[in-house]
Image (spheres, coloured by chain):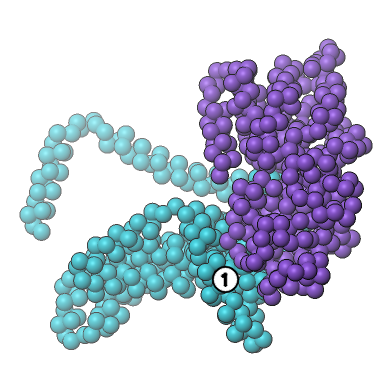
Amino acid sequence: MVAVYERTYQNATRVTRRANPFGFDPVFSALSKAAAITVLVLLAGIMASMVYGGWPAFQTFGLDFLTGTQWDTMNDNYGGLPAIVGTLSTALIAMLIGVPLSIGTAIYLTQLAPAWFKGPVGTAVELLAAVPSIIYGMWGLFVFVPLFAAYFQVPVSQVVEGMPIIGTILYARSPSGLGILSAGIILAFMIVPFIASLTRDMLDQIPTVLRESAYGIGCTTWEVVRHVLLPQAGVSIIGAVMLGLGRALGETMAVTFVIGNANRLSPSIMDPGSTIASRIASEFNEALGLQMNALIGLGCVLFFVTFVVLVIARILVSRVKQY
Amino acid sequence: MRTFAIAAAAFAAINFTPAAQAADITGAGATFPFPIYAKWAEAYKAATGVGLNYQSIGSGGGIRQIRAKTVDFGATDAPVKGEELTRDGMIQFPAVMGGLVPAINVAGVGQRGLKMTGPLLADIYLGNIKKWNDPKIVALNPGVSLPDATINVVYRSDGSGTTYVWTEYLSFVSADWKGKIGANTSVQWPVGVGGRGNEGVSGTVKQIANSIGYVEYAYAKQNNLAYALVQNKAGNFPVPDDKTFQAAAAEAKWDSMPGMGITLNDQPFPNAWPIVSATFILMYAKPSDPAKSQAALKFFDWAFTNGDKLALDLEYVPLPDAVKQQVRASWKGMTDPAGKPIF
């Protein structure tokens, strides 16, 4: 440790000595400042142009734009509730399935897996993260959805039909396999590699001393994970989860393939629906006039939802940090 | 798949020609005729050296682009109304035709193994008929064993001329549909799931058991989808092919609408397939650049004369000869600033 530090120090001093006193530093600082400002300007520009583009829709429909359930291109009457609900519910399902799956994967990879097994599974997780979303969508439509319809939707619908609450939430009126739940599951598959590989890296960075001492005082593996590792990596794991949530909220292509693209609000998660992103992807090409404004307005709403989620994440992270 | 390969090849051919060749014709719009326009462009380039850059951005986009005068012609599946043509000073003419079929995926029902009527299709898309073994479907198909399964309705989730043709047909044959839903490039579907594009609908129908979805005939054929025969106005069950599509168009009264924007749906002729449509071209009657418009007209003239075989190869239906003559006559209305006809 000390040797490494010395070497770095020497390298650093050598560089400084060679540098011109009137050299690159002011330019470098100006460049990096410009880079940071560009990001801010971009963000402000995107936000402003989306508000501007969506303004006619906000103005025409007011609050109904958020609470209305009609999406009527013939009479130019647009309400975004089904798409907003679809966005939130698919993301929620994805988190409920994806988070335990990815944290479990990370814990197994770092704590329990034999060394010969770590490599292949770790690589597989990273490869999954690199798969383009359209591949998930096509795989979802061509492989997952027919199996899901035949072996899950149909039998489950038969069992729950007529039951209170569950019979509403899980009943598929047309068992096509496409729907909110399918989209949520595909999204879960897509976010697992992100959260899992980030969490794995966090867990790997926890000093071995900490873990060894916990085992040393007689903790079981579960106790080590629960009371030592997870609290240590907690903040970073929440950050990773939020990154996954951001992706789930905005994912477009894969969702468009499997959600069924219906502009209807349904109490059942087996029924087809739509998300903000999938609605925009479906309709943007042919949209004219107020429909275009309404789509941009929906984009604005998505922007806002993502922003709120990120702020909540920040607050959560700072809370956890205090303990 | 073959169309796709050809389209891709043609796309490469027309889009990567050097920008310096200012003589290239530009067009934008409907996605449905893109493969044949691309194929025609490839052959036309080989024959004359003049290229065509066609962007298949959708009918709505095509109308937007020609109104913004960024292209020489716009292309749209649903015809533009007469008063809008007059207002914008545009002419409109059909270029090529296609037909829609209700593709089905029902175990045990083979190619053309099922008969349908327009009102039945409307009831299915309204959600009034929910099962494949509904008595009304069974009564029309004696001897066909239909499963006791829910019908999975599939529609286009994107705004599309194909949806316009389909919903217009359902409006013609069902008062219920006309009153509740109507005809448009996208409507409020009471039941079903949406697929994006013709390939999205054909892909969904292929994957989802017990489904039905409307697609361009070409897509049904290329994807080997089974489709139902639909009873026409004369009471017959014609087989969808270029002959029955042309039968709907040949005797139709094209001059009854401005810009030849007539519907070919539900025509009364004995051999006419009931769900047929033309796709249209929009150009300015007094273009600001007459030379470019003339080049575009020459292209379509060439395509009408030499392009029928190419169209049939890709499962499109060429316009009947009489209609082509009518289109050529309509071009006389296009003049340069001096008032001289361009074509």
Assign a secondary structure to mark 1: helix
| Residue B222, placed above or below residue A120 | above
Look at 80% across and 73% down and name the residue there.
B135
For label 1, the crowd category at 10 Å Cα-Cα, with few meaning under 14, some 14 to 19 and many 20 or more, is many
Q: Which residue is mark 1?
A: A149
Image coordinates for residue A112, horizontal then vertical, percent: 24, 74
Drawn side of residue A2 relative to residue B213, left or right: left
- Three-letter amino acid code of the residue under disc 1: Ala
Looking at the figure, which quarter contains the C terminus of chain A? Answer: bottom left
In the image, farthest residue toward the right: B256
| Along the line of sight, the residue nearer the viewer: A266 or B14 | B14
The colour assigned to chain B within the rendered structure: purple
Image coordinates for residue A124, horizontal then vertical, percent: 32, 60
| Along the line of sight, the residue nearer the viewer: A60 or B135 | B135
Observer able to see residue B8:
yes
Look at 81% across and 66% down and name the residue there.
B140
Image coordinates for residue A240, horizontal then vertical, percent: 38, 64
| Residue B146, placed above or below residue B287 | below
In the image, farthest residue toward the left: A3
The colour assigned to chain A within the rendered structure: cyan
Look at 86% across and 50% down and name the residue there.
B266
| Along the line of sight, the residue nearer the viewer: B264 or A229 | B264
In this figure, what is the number of numbered marks? Answer: 1
